[in-house]
Image (tube, grey):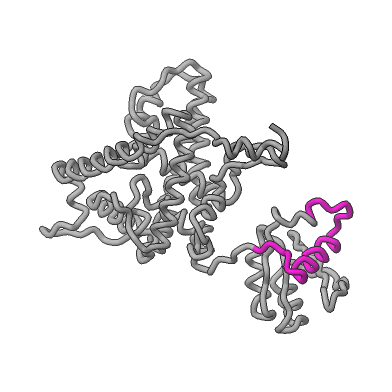
Amino acid sequence: MDIHRTFGEVVIWERGVLRHAGRVDMTRTGLEGLGKALLTTDEVVIEATGNCMAVSRVLSPFVARVVIANPLQVKAIAHAHVKTDKVDAGTLASLYAAGFLPEIWTPDPQTERLRRLTARRYQVVRHRTRIKNEVHAILHAHLIPRCPHADLFNGRGRAWLSRQPVPEDERAAIERHVRELDRLQEDLKDLDREIASGSLEDPAVRRLLTITGVNVAVATGLVAAIGDIGRFKNPQKLVSYFGLNPRVRQSGLGAAHHGRISKAGRSHARAMLVEAAWAAAKAPGPLHAFFVRIRAKRGHQIAAVALARKLTVLCWHLLTKDEDYRWARPALVASKTRAMELQAGLPQKKGNRRGPAYAYNVKDLRDQERQLAQQAERDYERFVERWRTRGPTSGVRGRLKPAGLE
């Protein structure tokens, strides 16, 4: 079935013969009518679109299986010379019958809900950043110097902003932007509460929180994007899923050329990994040493992406082996866990009994954990200081030459 916003084109493949079955309305009633007309042994094939999950939920009780195809890998449809809804639906049916249809993984309802929440949170954060940039652009257009305070949009920053000499229409625009920021902050708080409340008992989220630089938002976003870690047989599969693997071009006897990252997969999960990489690069530990080593060769931008890739590999190992990060800082992890509990709306603990997160407020304990992380960083530096970049061997050079030629 080739589905659209308002209708779907249905083609039935049976015993090697395709026959057109007409159109069905993209409504719950229309899809239920189609499902009742099918057999319980039938299988339905659709492409991944914005409403494919809803279509799958409606049709699943009536048929044996609903298969969702990856549209990026269905080349027969993308490169077809004759492209109509009927032809596309027939191509999906034929590819699935032949066993050549690239499928996508269908998440369970809880994972799908967490994906929707994290995607909405990412959109709110991007909208908030866009509004802040507009305010900065107004100040820049009128030669206003940079704000002397740490944040332009906190209490002191807003007081400074209100005293700047700008035209009345620009001042009105700034006030509208500030009111919109306050509204978005309330929306962000509600989304954080929903996300945290659904992740309190998730062991995968708590395990990812042990990684330096990974907060609650990043951990829940990664868990939502990954889903079942068992569907990735090795860490390279997960790296490719997030689009952090380099593009490779090679033909014939020529050497392989590695380019920029592919940027395939879920873009907001990749953005959160890069954000976590920047945070991990500022904290002491082996991850910081890795960032410094790559930065010295390739620059800080490439180093951040390389660190995001290493974080992806680290996440795969932690989730697959059910282990916490070896160089985790216990007080910091307890503080992040307590922050997640407070975001979820749990009551504050009062009394003389101190919780595990209190240790992060003690400077001596915090310094001890930093010293252990710095020791791990020095161990990593000693481990890699003897590495040398090796050029191509004689065997590789000889392989690039045709047989019999010197």
Identified at 55% across, 66% down, the residue is: 107
Furthest residue in direction bottom, as rendered: 40
Q: Quadrant of the N terminus?
A: bottom right
Furthest residue in direction top, as rendered: 143
Residue sitting nearer the eye, 364 or 54? 364
Q: Image height check: is 131 above or below 90?
A: above
Q: Image height check: is 172 above or below 213?
A: above
Could you tell me residue 375's position as x and y percent?
Answer: 23, 41
Q: Quadrant of the C terminus?
A: top right
Give the quadrant of residue 246. Answer: top right
Q: Note whether residue 285 is visible.
A: yes
Give the quadrant of residue 284. Answer: top left
Identified at 32% across, 53% down, the residue is: 325
Could you tell me residue 208's position as x and y percent?
Answer: 37, 55
Q: Image height check: is 157 above or below 166?
A: below
- The magenta stretch spans residue 35: no
Identified at 22% across, 53% down, the residue is: 357
Q: Magenta residues, as a range?
A: 77-103
Compared across the picture, whether 251 is left or right of 210 comes to right
Q: Note whether residue 173 is visible.
A: no
Identified at 61% across, 35% down, the residue is: 397
- The magenta stretch spans residue 101: yes
How many marks overall? 0
Could you tell me residue 310's position as x and y percent?
Answer: 44, 46
Could you tell me residue 233's position as x and y percent?
Answer: 52, 61
